[in-house]
Amino acid sequence: MSGSQARVARTLDLLTAGLGPAVQQAMSAEFGDGWVDVARQAFRNERMATVMARLEPSEWDAQALLTVMWDQWNAVFRHRLGLLERSLVSELRELRNRWAHQAEFSDDDLYRLIDSTFRLLRAVSASDLILRQLARLKLDVLRDMFSRQIEEERAQANARRDRLTEVVLFVVSGFAVVVATLVSLAPRNPLAGMLLVAFTLLTFGYLIVQRLRRPVMTHSVHECPVCRKIIYTEVCPYCEAVPPPKFLLAKSKEPVPEPAESHQSA
């Protein structure tokens, strides 16, 4: 498991640990001892309902807890949380589904997952220990992003310096050949001297133009920030070759469903 995947898994574990008590407390306060049966009505997928029926609420994962929150939002959670937290629930459900389908997480996706988890758990008054661990994860991701940015900027500066050095060498070499030609050959054979000077200027001029037009290449052996594979080029061939999963393309076109109005009484 790569560093990014481990951080996603760790974040989802913290989300489960922080969200579980909050969901149980809110649901039991609204529905009393029968809250578990009401919560299980949110699992409309047959496979998920079968799995969750065998598990105790304390064993429910982040997907189950977020599903209950989304389904019971109008009946329970909108009285305790706001529209921002509702959008966080929707976002975390989507990110968790991407993780379940083994979609790759970029650094931005990873930071967004951790930050959204932190904000939602802070809103439901999760324990300080969980919030501190999430804050540490956010700092680790930012540190890695900044380190890569610094390395890229340093590589670009070195590449620009190398390009300038090559251009200066071309100019000096061409100038030296022209001067030597004018001093030694031109007085004895003006035509040959002029031809050699013209050839020298064209050759070194072409080399200089080509070197200046060539893009600055800063890539070396490094890790792709998206798929986390070791690559040797600036553009990751693995990410280019693999199209996005079909379920993501289809899901991106679907409207976000509104939470169903609950008919349960308080």
Image: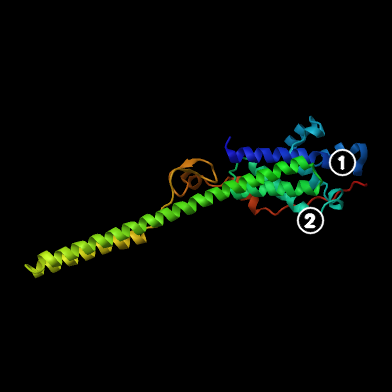
Q: Quarter-wise, where is residue 43 in the image?
A: top right
Q: Residue at x 64, y 54 (%)?
A: 253
Seen in the image, is 36 located left or right of residue 91?
Answer: right
Q: What is the residue that sits farthest to the top in this orientation?
A: 54
Along the line of sight, which residue is nearer the eye, 75 or 87?
A: 87
Q: Residue at x 43, y 51 (%)?
A: 218
Seen in the image, is 114 located left or right of residue 143?
Answer: right
Q: CA distance from mark 2 to mark 1?
A: 20 Å
Q: Amino acid at mark 1?
A: Gln
Q: Residues within 10 Å of mark 2 (few under 14, many from 20)?
A: few
Q: Is residue 161 above or below residue 48?
A: below
Residue 182 pos. (x, y %): 14, 67
2 and 1 marks in contact (CB < 8 Å): no
Residue 158 pos. (x, y %): 42, 53
| Quarter of the figure with the N terminus | top right
Q: Amino acid at mark 2?
A: Leu
Seen in the image, is 24 located left or right of residue 218?
Answer: right
Question: Which residue is denoted by mark 1 in the rendering?
Answer: 25
Along the line of sight, which residue is nearer the eye, 217 or 83?
A: 217
> Of helix, strand and loop, which one carries label 1?
helix
Residue 112 pos. (x, y %): 66, 50
Seen in the image, is 148 located left or right of residue 100?
Answer: left
Q: Quick check: can you spot residue 216?
A: no
Q: What is the residue that sits farthest to the front in this orientation?
A: 183
Q: How many marks?
A: 2
Residue 38 pos. (x, y %): 86, 40
| First in residue order: circle 2 vs circle 1 | 1
Q: Quick check: can you spot residue 138?
A: yes
> Of helix, strand and loop, which one carries label 2?
helix
Q: Which mark is residue 231?
A: none
Question: Which residue is denoted by mark 2 in the rendering?
Answer: 83
Along the line of sight, which residue is nearer the eye, 133 or 46?
A: 133
